[in-house]
Image (tube, rainbow, N blue to C red):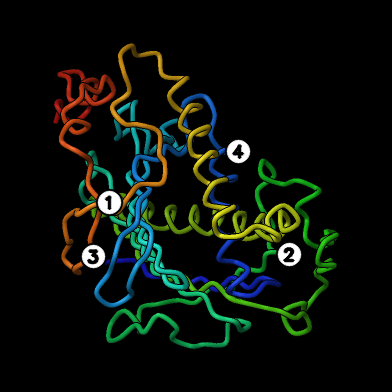
Amino acid sequence: MVLIKEYRICMPLTVEEYRVGQLYMIARHSYEQTENGEGVETIINAPCEDPVHGKGQFTEKRIHLSTRLPFWIQAIIPKVFYIIEKSWNYYPFTITEYTCSFIPKLSVTIHTKFEDNSGITENCLGLTGEKLVERTVDFIDIAYDEVSSKHYREDEDLKFFQSKKTMRGPLTENWKKTVSPIMCSYKVVEASFEVWGIQSKAEEYIQKTIREILLLGHRQAFAWIDDWITMTIADVRSYECEMQRQTNTKVNAACTLSGPENYEVSRPLSPLPGNPDGNGRQTPELSPQRQNQSNPRRELRNSSSGWLSRQ
């Protein structure tokens, strides 16, 4: 059984403003959350195209997080562990998928749509049948839902924050009924972890973790508004490229293995032919030269001492 939740996250922004704000927030957040070899490593960042949604941007990332997981999950995974994130951004609609080759029964899919309203659209992502029946709706309040103590920063507390450039904020109680502009991120998250004995526990943990990330990310997007509100798309893409380069450096610098890294640092790429997936999306692929390069991390994971080899 797949656990389905729909998160609705409102912000005092317009959908058009958040087009820049989202890219800025993800790039900066990824950099700030990466340390000691754990965090987000960007592998591909390139244009893509969908027969329904048109042109967009495809990214593939590795999320290194072994020591950040609960001990009961660490016990069943290899010490060197990462999750693969693939995202197709056809703003204001996006698709994000999370998989892990070490845990083939792990699957998380997020469909997102942004609208200029306060979260009043009852079925924004067009769910049908059993998915609509099984879905639970969770409203996330970026000002009054508490982030974990390790993520709390006073200058990001939206109950007190006011933008100097837009004069928006602070967000008072019931702010969603009074502020203008206002927009909503609608996110349908489907989490599946079909491992006997821990399936329900794992799926609840996945949803809890995603909720915390969504709360923190959207909170930061508004708290950092004065840093990105005057940026153009070209400006934020340039910023994104540089932050991805620095973030990749932080991840790889902590690796004690010798030898060249398999992948180049992410940068804006020209359109690639790629391979259409089951939905017709053209997904950029790595060049044969980059695919065939020796990767010490991969060799470690495939060695006889790896977790999977013992099963």
Chain-order first, disc 4 or disc 1: 4
Q: What's the CA distance linking mark 2 and mark 4?
A: 21 Å
Q: Which mark is residue 32?
A: 4
Pointer 2 with pointer 4, Cβ within 8 A: no
Q: Nearer the viewer, mark 2 or mark 4?
A: 4
Q: CA distance from mark 1 to mark 2?
A: 32 Å
**208 w.r.t. 40: above or below:** below
Circle on res. 235:
none
Q: Nearer the viewer, residue 227 or 107?
A: 227
Which label belongs to residue 143? 2
Residue 84, percent across and down?
32, 45
Residue at the (54%, 55%) spot, across then down: 234
Residue at the spot of label 1: 106
Q: In front: mark 3 or mark 1?
A: 3
C-alpha gap between disc 4 and disc 1: 26 Å
Viewer-nearest residue: 206 or 60: 60
Q: Is residue 243 left or right of residue 255?
A: right
**Regarding mark 4 in the picture, which secondary structure is present there?**
helix
Mark 3 highlights which residue? 281
